[in-house]
Image (tube, coloured by chain):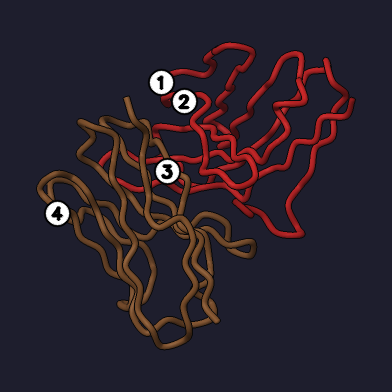
Chain colours: A brown, B red
Amino acid sequence: KAGVTQTPRYLIKTRGQQVTLSCSPISGHRSVSWYQQTPGQGLQFLFEYFSETQRNKGNFPGRFSGRQFSNSRSEMNVSTLELGDSALYLCASSLHNEQFFGPGTRLTVL
Amino acid sequence: GESVGLHLPTLSVQEGDNSIINCAYSNSASDYFIWYKQESGKGPQFIIDIRSNMDKRQGQRVTVLLNKTVKHLSLQIAATQPGDSAVYFCADNTSGTYKYIFGTGTRLKVLA
């Protein structure tokens, strides 16, 4: 069974731009969560989706948004990028409680 | 991935020795816990989990201990190998919240 996939793996953007990251969960998994990982803050929860509905959201500004499609694939969007948005963005999928992570998208904002 | 910063606790152990990695959590309502391993350039990898109705669970070479009284979790790795070198995170979840809270992580270095 294929694992969680994320695209792209690496991305370089400039301040003020926007970015869309994609996540395909493990087949059969309907819950998708997003996390931001930085050296200073560690792993921070962004949001969680299940059956196209956001069930929980972390403490991030409204520039961070996400959505989930009917096939459980998910995207997250960051608008008006800031230097501090540089991070590894991780997606995790779950069937019940266990969360399985993808390799992440490394976003660098210049 | 570069999952940790300069202030990450580090545990150095000799190859073949047992490792114990500790984690404290803050939410007394947390009822499910996971340990993850993260190697450089990769996402966190699921190692073992435990529910709050248990205080110990064993896997292959790994054991997780849960002490709900003091809100403490530990991961024991038996006969530590060079391939165990990584950053280890604990994460806790409360049923119905659909989110995990991650610890700051511990870097494990295995010395040959």
N-terminal-most mark, 3 or 4: 4
Foreground mark, 3 or 4, reads 3
Same subunit: marks 1 and 4: no
Q: Residue A22 appears at what percent x and percent y?
A: 31, 56
> In what element is the residue under mark 2?
strand
Distance between the Cα atoms at labels 3 and 1? 29 Å
Residue that badge 4 annotates: A53
In the displayed structure, does residue B69 sit left or right of residue B109? left
Q: Residue B67 appears at what percent x and percent y?
A: 57, 27
Which residue is located at x 80 percent, y 37 percent? B11
Residue situated furthest left in the rendering? A70
Amino acid bearing label 4: Thr
Foreground mark, 1 or 2, reads 2
Residue that badge 2 annotates: B49
> In what element is the residue under mark 1?
loop
Check disc 4: other Cα within 10 Å, few if <14, some if 14-19, many if 20+: few
Check disc 2: other Cα within 10 Å, few if <14, some if 14-19, many if 20+: many
In the displayed structure, does residue B49 sit left or right of residue A68? right
Residue that badge 1 annotates: B53
Foreground mark, 4 or 2, reads 4
Which residue is located at x 28 percent, y 45 percent? A24
Residue that badge 3 annotates: A102
Q: Chain of mark 4?
A: A
Up/down of B65 relative to A89, above or below: above
Distance between the Cα atoms at labels 3 and 2? 18 Å
Q: Chain of mark 1?
A: B
Amino acid bearing label 2: Asp
Check disc 3: other Cα within 10 Å, few if <14, some if 14-19, many if 20+: many
| Foreground residue among A51 and B74 | A51
| Foreground residue among A86 and A56 | A86
